[in-house]
Image (cartoon, rainbow, N blue to C red):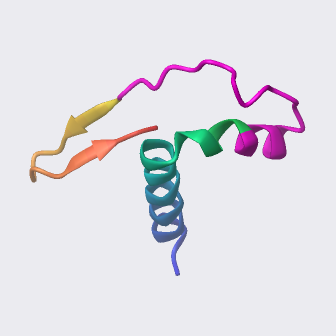
Amino acid sequence: MSDTMNSTIFDDVFRTMVQKMPQLLIPLINEVFHTNYSEKEAFKQLRNEYEEESGKIISDS
């Protein structure tokens, strides 16, 4: 599998997790960055989307 394909799969999984299971975001951040944020910590999801000439919507979480 190419690096581009792996990046796309990771991006898709991460974006889906953030959108459908936002309660997992803080535990993920704590695990990856060895932090100890409370799961009750407030956070704001910002959308960064644009449409390619082909019509494909690109989103960056």
For residue 32, side relative to residue 60 (left or right): right
Q: Is residue 15 left or right of residue 31?
A: left
Judged left or right of residue 26, residue 59 is: left
Residue at horizontal 41 percent and vertical 23 percent from the top: 46
| 54 to the left or right of 30 | left
Residue 38, how many percent across, how many down? 78, 26
Count of marks overlaid on the render: 0
Spot the residue most to the front: 40
On the image, the x and y values in percent for residue 40 come to 69, 24
Q: Position of residue 53 (x, y in %)?
A: 10, 46
The image quadrant of residue 3 is bottom right
Q: Residue furthest bottom?
A: 1
Quarter-of-image position of residue 34: top right
Task: Examine the structure image and report whether residue 45 is included in the region drawn in magenta.
Answer: yes
Residue 44 in magenta stretch? yes
Q: Main secondary structure of the magenta part?
A: loop
* Bounds of the magenta segment: 27-47
In front here: 59 or 53? 59
Q: Look at the picture and state if 4 lies above or below 16.
A: below
Compared to residue 37, the image places residue 23 above or below, namely: below
Work out whether residue 23 or residue 1 is closer to the camera in this orientation and state it. 23
Q: Examine the rendered structure and indicate whether residue 43 appears above or below residue 9.
A: above
Q: Nearer the viewer, residue 40 or 10?
A: 40
Residue at the spot x=49%, y=59% of the render? Answer: 13
Q: Tell me if residue 55 comes above or below residue 37 in the rendering.
A: below
Asked whether 36 or 47 is in front, the reply is 36
